[in-house]
Image: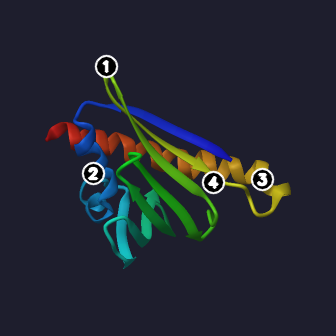
């Protein structure tokens, strides 16, 4: 499964990057996020349980977050739940119109024969919707500042 969500934000790249990297603040400006619990917290690596909603459906997963300030990437590796093994990368590109922020999700399903169905449900219904909401609310947050 490959899923990419992209949006243009009109704020400094630094402000956008820091808002995306600081998971602790996400539930304050991302209304679909229920909570973020830290198991381990550090300046470049965090182990977290993330919980969001897709409409009225609550979901949660455990991720390792890596903040790479040199490459301007934020990476997640899903360690538990239906998306175990998924790699997520946030990338930031300066453009004349603003900063393009993209979230790329990559997952090889553990049961290959179920991949077509799982891709529609996990990728289309859950991941696409939640990532789109995340980008839209983050855009509103950073553009207000």
Q: Which mark is residue 96?
A: 1
Residue that label 2 marks: 19
Instruction: Identify the residue shown where x is 39% and y is 58%.
Output: 67
Q: Residues within 10 Å of mark 4 (few under 14, many from 20)?
A: some
Considering every residue shown, the one lying at the far top of the view is 96
Looking at the image, is mark 3 or mark 1 earlier in the sequence?
A: 1
Q: Which label was assigned to residue 115?
A: 3
Left or right of 52, for residue 69: left
Give the quarter of the figure containing the C terminus: top left
Name the one closer to the observer, 47 or 127: 47
Which of disc 2 and disc 3 is earlier in sequence? 2
Q: Position of residue 8 (x, y in %)?
A: 35, 30
Name the residue tied to disc 4. 122
Query: Which of marks 4 and 2 precedes in the sequence?
Result: 2
For marks 1 and 4, the one nearer the N-term is 1
Compared to residue 6, the image places residue 17 above or below, namely below
Task: Determine whether 132 is above or below 49 in the image.
Answer: above
Residue beneath the point at 31% across and 19% down: 96
């Amino acid at each position: 499964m490959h899923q990419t969500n992209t949006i243009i934000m009109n704020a400094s790249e630094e402000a956008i990057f820091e808002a995306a990297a600081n998971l602790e603040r996400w539930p304050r400006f991302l209304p679909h996020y229920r909570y973020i619990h830290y198991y381990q917290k550090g300046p470049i690596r965090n182990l977290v349980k993330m919980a969001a909603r897709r409409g009225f459906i609550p979901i949660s997963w455990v991720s390792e977050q890596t903040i790479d300030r040199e490459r301007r990437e934020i990476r997640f590796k899903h360690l538990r739940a239906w998306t175990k093994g998924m790699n997520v990368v946030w990338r930031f590109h300066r453009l004349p119109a603003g900063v393009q922020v993209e979230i790329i999700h990559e997952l090889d399903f553990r049961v290959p024969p179920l991949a077509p169905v799982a891709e529609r449900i996990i990728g289309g219904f859950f991941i696409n919707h939640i990532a789109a909401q995340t980008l839209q609310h983050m855009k509103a947050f950073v553009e207000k500042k």
